[in-house]
């Protein structure tokens, strides 16, 4: 069953007078696991902000759907880039995760429902932070932070999960674990994933969206040189570092 | 020792005690918010800009607190608006309003004919001359603050911690931001009489940073800040009374000394652990 949940039509967006995304058409379906790649400054973050409602488009439309019915918004889980987080803030792992469930129970008077506590516990176990529930975020390692913020994104049971570079600051074993977890989640949740690790992306996602001022959708997870070149895609990814090696290796078999 | 207890036989001293208590609660709560949200500089701007209102009020011959109130809120809203719309750099906007407010205050005080009574008490604080009306204002504000923080606690924390994420959860981020910046302005203005414009930032930051030495929990920071703030303002007020020094100055000195001692104790403890 394939239902669309987000649809961008002829959408342009940017900051002040500068256009970052130009005439983008993009549809996300409920069973999608889409990897978003593109050069720095190409508009990946702008695209996420538009979908998250943090930025208004210059022109064009964005629509949300629930069972083919147009709705004003859908429940989106968001994992931001964690270097933007103030790690001196006095808040514990458990409190961060529960801050994803504030809607509807924001008062100290309302006694926390059992259901909430069970859900919190369930999520903490799922992302593997239940043993550090009381720790302040300032005391966490990069990987533990990513797990915590992933928990916050997941706790409201979103129909769309948006992850902005979840693989930075994490060790290799967690990276693998993270992608396995996402694979499991993607059965019930649509996922949009921005990552620099093109090799890793291509083994897990179902399709690729390449963002570089415009957006090219590639309905398979194979990234080959031809795709990248013809879509005028992340040239810097091809020319720098170990990534091109992995990309090519994936395709040479 | 008896001299200290004699102090409370006078009505104005009871008022001063009450003022210190209420000041500790209001500054403890709102200061915790200011500190964790890194809004200390914004608060400094609001405080100093409110002096413009005091100057105009002197000129017009009305209650200086009314002027401070108007200017404080106006500055708070302007800063919130200017920063969010990114028309100006955040810190530049604050510095401009900060200086402009002080300038307007000085301007009007100088063109006001005759002597301007109590001007020093607004600059440096005068806990011993707090009136019954000012106590009642502080009581109302305290109740309002406590109610707001109980009712909206989790939204306030979510917005303060990660505003962008809070927006994606459709929380009323803009409402909370404006509500809290207005409360910040009101707390500052009503505490001017106790601490003085120049020194009020201390009550909004020193107890909170002391508290933060012992806990990483926002609720505990609020509670400890109130306690530390009260200790500071109580002994500060005793000193102010006996040495005849503006209360703002003595409170800051007591708070700063306490902070240094605690910081030292914690540092030694941490050092011993290794």
Image (cartoon, helix red, strand yellow):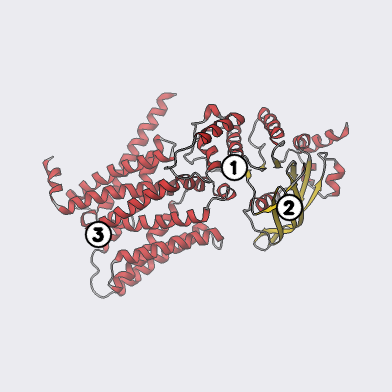
**Alpha carbon distance from label 1 to label 3:** 48 Å
Residues marked 1 and 3 touching at CB (< 8 Å): no
Q: Which residue is mark 3?
A: B133
Label annotation for residue B34: none
Mark 2: few/some/many CA within 10 Å (<14, 14-19, 20+): some
Residues marked 3 and 2 touching at CB (< 8 Å): no
**Alpha carbon distance from label 2 to label 1:** 29 Å
**Alpha carbon distance from label 3 to label 2:** 59 Å
Count all numbered tags in the image, as a single digit: 3
Q: Which residue is mark 2?
A: A7
Residue B14 percent across, percent down from the top left: 19, 50
Mark 1: few/some/many CA within 10 Å (<14, 14-19, 20+): few
Q: In which quadrant is the C terminus of chain A drawn?
A: top right
Q: Is residue B199 visible?
A: no
Q: Of the residues under marks 2 and 1, which one precedes in the sequence?
A: 2
Dot 3: element: helix
Residue A153 percent across, percent down from the top left: 61, 40
Which one is in front, B132 or A184? A184
Asked if labels 2 and 1 share a chain, the reply is yes
Q: From the viewer's perspective, is A105 left or right of A155?
A: left
Which one is in front, A100 or B265? A100
Chain letter of the residue carrying label 2: A
Asked if labels 3 and 2 share a chain, the reply is no
Asked if labels 1 and 3 share a chain, the reply is no
Point 33% across, 72% down: residue: B108
Chain letter of the residue carrying label 3: B
Point 61% across, 36% down: residue: A146
Q: Which residue is mark 1?
A: A83
Q: In which quadrant is the N terminus of chain A drawn?
A: top right
């Amino acid at each position: 069953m394939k239902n669309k949940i987000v649809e961008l039509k002829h959408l342009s967006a940017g900051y002040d007078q500068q256009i970052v995304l130009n005439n983008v058409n993009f549809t996300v379906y409920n069973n999608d696991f889409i990897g978003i790649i593109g050069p720095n400054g190409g508009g990946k973050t702008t695209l996420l902000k538009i979908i998250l409602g943090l930025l208004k488009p210059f022109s064009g439309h964005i629509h949300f759907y629930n069972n083919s019915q147009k709705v004003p918004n859908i429940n989106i889980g968001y994992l931001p880039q964690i270097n933007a987080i103030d790690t001196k803030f006095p808040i514990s792992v458990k409190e961060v995760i529960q801050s994803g469930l504030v809607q509807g129970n924001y008062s100290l008077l309302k006694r926390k429902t059992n259901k909430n506590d069970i859900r919190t516990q369930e999520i903490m176990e799922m992302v593997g932070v239940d043993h550090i529930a009381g720790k302040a975020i300032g005391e966490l390692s990069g990987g533990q932070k990513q797990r915590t913020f992933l928990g916050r994104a997941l706790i409201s049971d979103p129909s769309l999960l948006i992850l902005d570079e979840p693989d930075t600051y994490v060790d290799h074993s967690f990276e693998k674990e993270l992608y396995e977890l996402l694979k499991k989640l993607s059965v019930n949740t649509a996922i949009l994933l921005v990552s620099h690790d093109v090799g890793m992306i291509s083994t897990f996602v179902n399709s690729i969206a390449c963002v570089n001022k415009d957006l090219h959708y590639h309905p398979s997870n194979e990234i080959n040189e031809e795709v990248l070149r013809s879509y005028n895609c992340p040239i810097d990814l091809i020319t720098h570092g170990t990534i091109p090696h992995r990309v090519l290796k994936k395709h040479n078999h | 020792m008896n001299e200290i207890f004699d102090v409370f036989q006078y009505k104005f001293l009871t008022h001063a005690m009450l003022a210190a208590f209420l000041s500790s609660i209001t500054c403890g709560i709102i200061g915790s918010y200011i500190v964790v949200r890194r809004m200390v500089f914004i608060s400094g701007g609001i405080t100093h800009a409110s002096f413009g209102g005091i100057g105009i009020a002197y000129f017009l011959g009305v209650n200086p607190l009314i002027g401070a109130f108007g200017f404080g809120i106006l500055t708070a809203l302007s800063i919130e608006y200017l920063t969010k719309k990114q028309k100006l750099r955040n810190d530049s906007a604050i510095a401009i309003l900060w200086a402009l407010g002080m300038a307007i205050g000085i301007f009007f005080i100088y063109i006001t004919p005759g002597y301007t009574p109590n001007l020093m008490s607004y600059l440096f604080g005068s806990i011993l001359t707090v009136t019954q009306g000012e106590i009642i204002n502080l009581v109302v504000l305290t109740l309002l603050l406590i109610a707001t923080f109980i009712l909206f606690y989790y939204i306030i924390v979510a917005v303060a911690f990660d505003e962008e994420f809070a927006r994606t959860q459709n929380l009323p981020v803009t409402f909370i931001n404006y509500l809290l910046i207005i409360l910040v302005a009101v707390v500052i203005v009503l505490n001017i009489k106790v601490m003085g414009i120049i020194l009020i930032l201390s009550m909004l930051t020193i107890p909170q940073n002391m508290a933060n030495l012992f806990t990483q929990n926002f609720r505990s920071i609020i509670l400890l800040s109130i306690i530390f703030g009260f200790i500071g303002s109580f002994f500060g007020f005793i000193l102010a009374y006996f040495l005849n020094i503006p209360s703002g100055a003595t409170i800051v000195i007591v708070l700063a000394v306490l902070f240094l001692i605690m910081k030292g104790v914690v540092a030694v403890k941490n050092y011993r652990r290794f």
